[in-house]
Image (cartoon, rainbow, N blue to C red):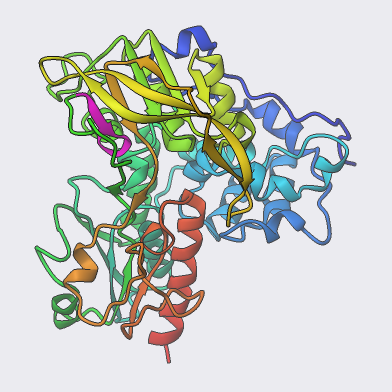
Amino acid sequence: MADMSPIKTPMPSQEPHIRNKNFDEVALGYTYDMAVSEAKRCLNCKNKPCVSQCPVAVNIPAFIERVANEDMEGAYQILNQSTSLPAVCGRVCPQENQCEGKCIRAIKGESVGIGRLERFVADWHREHATEKPSKPASNGHKVAVIGAGPSGLTCAGDLAKLGYEVTVFEALHVAGGVLSYGIPEFRLPKAIVNHEIEGLKDLGVDIQCNTVIGKTLTVDELFDMGYEAMFIGSGAGLPRFMGIPGESLKGVYSANEYLTRINLMKAYQEGSSTPILRAKRVAVVGGGNVAMDAARCAKRMGAEEVYIVYRRGMQELPARREEVEHAIEEGIIFKTLCNPIEVLGDENGFVSGLKCVEMELGEPDESGRRRPVVKQGSEFILDAEVMIMSIGTSPNPLIRSTTPGLEANRHGCLVVRDESGLTSRDNVYAGGDAVTGAATVILAMGAGKKAAAAIHEQLSK
């Protein structure tokens, strides 16, 4: 019989005044007993509404039932049927808007902690498994994957399980994409990412780093090398700026650059040779998850005051509720209904502050959200020595500009014909941020999974 407690088992975590000074993981994870207790809150619904909202269609009730019965390896094997990155998903998926958002238990209380249980099972397997996954027999087909981020790794993993010879081409010197360069260590330890990637290599996935498709090799050259199909999961790493005066001053970063210096180049480590400007006051412009990551990193890098500058209100913040709550707990200051109009500089060309205006919400725009408008006569100066722009990204144009017949929309995102991810080029599929623009890890994984299924259907005819 299910445990009818209306409250999910709390997640142990570091205290805010301690964690905002280190890069260790904030959430400490369930103990064995906590996981079993939480799993027993699941009603094992016949209709499985949670599964309908999972982009990779994990059989959620089945894996949770195994946890409740203390069959952790069985739970992991169920997860492994649907996702190649369970330890990642359990940490960074916006479960509250997906599987947990549809949980029946949430009607009269809190949902089952699906993400927390997925994390526990993946971590348990990593710590207790004694055998590596074996490479399936080859089916004789070769597929190329461009980009070793969430969508590319998912596509590669699913195809490798079906016997395809898969090569992943990655522009950076390490695999992982946004999992490695974008999401901070305190949310997603890189050891976790590396372990998941090693599991894919055990399946036979070949990852070639330092290979920039569009320069080192082109899409057409890959076809000439014998690859029969291709998946483009190159992400959206081109940062956007506001176009206001002063954006070229020293101390203005894109969130991508700032987080890459910290996460991938280890600027947070003692003795790191990676240059990064440390400041007492930092302003982060934007309200999404990336903005929260940048602000929380700045705090850990020694800033005394870190501001989130966002032109709408707290209720309109697009970041996950959990990330906003963690940021508030860690001392991040939210300057909402506020927008910068100029970056001010000192005589040496460094940022000295932001000229901002107060905003108020007017009529809804095309997205349905109330449009922010300037409150007249509301200019003020916000003191800051570093400004981090986190207002979105778009795909790098390199691949589409070097691939004849590959169509993109006005935002630079690749155009696909249907949910399979097939582009305007035959046997070239795409998914993740390269198609949607910046979105979530799990949506990118879902796109990679659908493309893998479509590629298999095409090549196995």
Is 276 rendered above or below residue 419? above
Q: Image point 60% across, 29% down: which residue?
A: 314
Q: Image point 19% across, 54% down: which residue?
A: 171
Q: Give percent across and percent down for residue 114.
A: 67, 42
Membership of 254 in magenta stretch: yes
Quarter of image, res 366: bottom right
Q: Give percent across and percent down for residue 181.
A: 30, 39
Q: Image point 54% across, 24% down: which residue?
A: 27
Q: Which residues are magenta?
A: 251-257
Is 369 rendered above or below residue 227? above
Quarter of image, res 124: top right
Q: Is residue 134 visible?
A: no
Q: Give percent across and percent down for residue 262.
A: 27, 28
Q: Nearer the viewer, residue 235 or 253?
A: 253
Position of the C terminus, as image quadrant, is bottom left
Residue extending furthest front? 377
Is 80 rendered above or below residue 450? above
Residue 130 placement, left or right of 48: left
Membership of 443 in magenta stretch: no
Q: Give percent across and percent down for residue 224.
A: 14, 82
Q: Is residue 52 visible?
A: yes
Residue 280 placement, left or right of 71: left
